[in-house]
Image: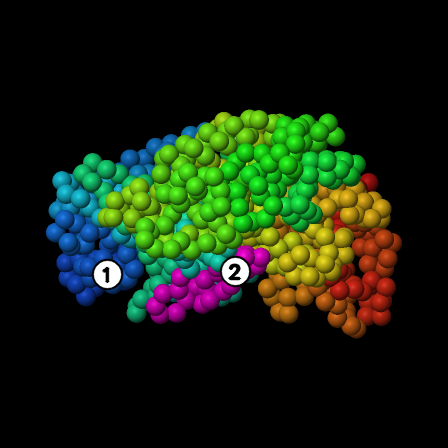
Amino acid sequence: MPIEWDAQDRQLHLWNGQVSHVMRVLDNGWLGHLHFGAPLAPGRSYAHLGPPRFGGFQNRPADPVALEYPVTGSGDYRVPAIVVEQPDGSTLLDLAYVGHAISAGKPGLGALPATYVEDPGEADTVEIRLADGPSGLSVTLAYTVFRDLPVVARSARLRNDGDGSLRVGTAMSASLDLADADWVMVQLSGAWARERHVVERPLAPGRVSVSSQRGASSAQQNPFIVLRRRATTEEAGEAYGLGLVYSGDFLAEAEVDPFGTARARIGIDPTHFAWTLEPGEELVLPEAVAAWSGEGLGALSDAYHRLYRERLARGAWRDALRPVLVNNWEGTYFDFTADRIVAMAEVAAELGIELFVLDDGWFGERDSDTTSLGDWYVDRRKLPGGLENVARRVEALGMRFGLWIEPEMVSPRSRLFEAHPDWALGVPGRPRTEQRQQLVLDMSRPEVVDHLAAVLTGILGSAPISYVKWDMNRYMTEAYSTALPPDRQGELRHRYILGVYELYARLTAAFPHILFESCASGGGRFDPGMLAFAPQAWTSDDTDAVERLRIQWGTSLAYPLSSMGAHVSAVPNHQVGRVTPLHTRAAVAFFGVFGYELDTLALTADERREVAAQVAFYTRHRDVLQRGRFVRLRSPFAGDGTETAWMAVSDDRRRAVVGAYRVLDRPYDGPSRLRLRGLDPASAYRVSCWPETGDAVDRANAGVRGGDDLMAAGLALRAGPFDTATRADYAARLFVLETVEEA
Ligand code: DGJ
């Protein structure tokens, strides 16, 4: 059993040979934290890692005592995990250990998405009950250690066992005390069209945090942070990860105290959160996923990728290879007819593309983004035969058909808004802020969720639909619900997300064969909560190859290739106006769930040939490119950012695809060797360039090479300082490695 309870020391140790989490009931009954990170041997006491004494306050654990779920107001001045206002107005808590239960497997989190096991043998869970006598608050902390991952999944459940109302303000999913503060925080920050760029800041006395108060996890910040040592690289060194399986407001933070220790915490952002627990009521907090690596950021990402791909994503599409799609959005925007769609699909089918996605504009009278969200009936002006007709015509070409929806929104110019103005978020008597001419539906209202479930069930059942792109194109403003009493408005944002999850749960259950892709103006809600329902997400509206290097690199810190929608679009690029070669656009988009985002009818004969070859290449290597191990080799965030390289390796290490990119060329440059990683040093690999050009770089690399050689010496990215034939800006090289038997 990888969870050990030592009754004498009152110590719990979760261990699996890859990670350890050790905690201990302190003398005053509080739950102390002893260690999380490097694997420690079972069967030993680690009590010596606990506090020698309780510091400045003689009778209570105070700063810098390490705790599992710290409270506030009685000597610990660091950021707390929980703040609860009690009937007498006080917020003091003494959360004392009551008991614990160890079980095989992992219990679910009710309405909240969470990682899971398929077999109880995959993980063990300990649930530890803490209680505060005077208020009646009970906190159950759950920790799951997976058998073969350096990961501990954590959650907390609050219950009011007293007889007065409790008002929960701060309620973190996890708090993690670290013995020193010599860490660099890595965060994934950005904006629309430049999501999840890697930003790093060393911890310093005080707080370093990222958060969202937008009602969605957001493009601006992501619910994932890493704390790494200064010397940690992709390949070596220590790093912690903290991710939150949640799609709404979040806070991820690290604080350094005067004694040089650090406390990290992650959970729902407390700014707008206030939840009333009446006697007997319970509140389940979102799951936090804590991971540790002693072998660099690469191994940390490996752990998250495997867990999220295999035990967070679910349903028929979890393990299935995803289809190559073409989406008409940038090809037509709102201006299309059924015949035009079918003509585009005809070309796509000839090129080997497997799925046609009809984006925004098929419903109501939506000729622009000024109208019709909420009116989920087919626009017969554009699609006279309805969805069924266009879907069947696409299917007749041998392709599947997919559809865009944006359930959570309403246009002020719509029948739905006319009928139910109170279904949109807003404060009575004050103007509602419109963004993209739309308002946010109040997903905290069960009748709104019921209505959307009924209407969308009708739509998705009305035609052979194999794929749904669920979009969400604005953040919350005037986040107020007329369905909630004044003193419950602090619950709205969380209830909204619960409503979104409820709708997702109903639709994915009703249509298990449909592949869902989540989207929020691109990657504005790319988070683990969404991945539990939609195994892939539209990574960014920015499809420019150069921009995508940074976006996909940053996203890959936490999220697997199988989750990242990546498309080739037309040039000049619609977001940045850049003109990059078609080959480069594909060579970047191959590392993800590949597709196209353009008007296939506008492709020249040469481009059609190239696209057909790209689709054939991707489908041949799709298993590696979607499910292989992703290895980051050269960072677009390092140096002048002009070089990026990465690779995907099959689990058996017999095949790999390497992508190497150069944004701007540099004259009179050396051979630039790219050392690979993750290969079998004892195997021989046939190296080929794709496409084969026979140029000097091809010739320098093609042939059979040992895995040891490829990892120690690497591939040559340059033919030499005077070889101008292979030089260009926005250049990409792809190498395919396949093991061969040597005589
Ligand atoms: C934003 C998405 O990210 C785009 O791909 C597209 O679906 C538009 N919305 C449609 O309005």
Pointer 2 with pointer 1, Cβ within 8 A = no
Q: Residue at x 55, y 30 (%)?
A: 460
Query: In the rendering, at what x and y percent does residue 56 appear?
Result: 19, 66
What residue range appears in magenta?
183-209
The residue at which mark 1 appears reads as 76
Q: Viewed as shown, does residue 32 lie left or right of 674?
A: left
The answer to if 593 sits in the magenta stretch is no
Q: Residue at x 26, y 38 (%)?
A: 282
Name the element at disc 2. loop
Q: Viewed as shown, does residue 84 lie left or right of 640?
A: left
The tag earlier along the polypeptide, 2 or 1, is 1
Query: In the rendering, at what x and y percent does residue 440 appear?
Result: 43, 47
The answer to if 185 sits in the magenta stretch is yes
Name the element at disc 1. loop
Residue type pointed to by label 1: Asp
Neighbor class of circle 1 (other Cα within 10 Å; few <14, some 14-19, many 20+) is some
The residue at which mark 2 appears reads as 190
Question: Residue furthest toward the bottom?
Answer: 668
- Residue 502: image quadrant is top left
Cβ of mark 1 under 8 Å from ligand 1: the answer is no
Q: Residue at x 51, y 63 (%)?
A: 199
Q: Residue at x 48, y 54 (%)?
A: 435
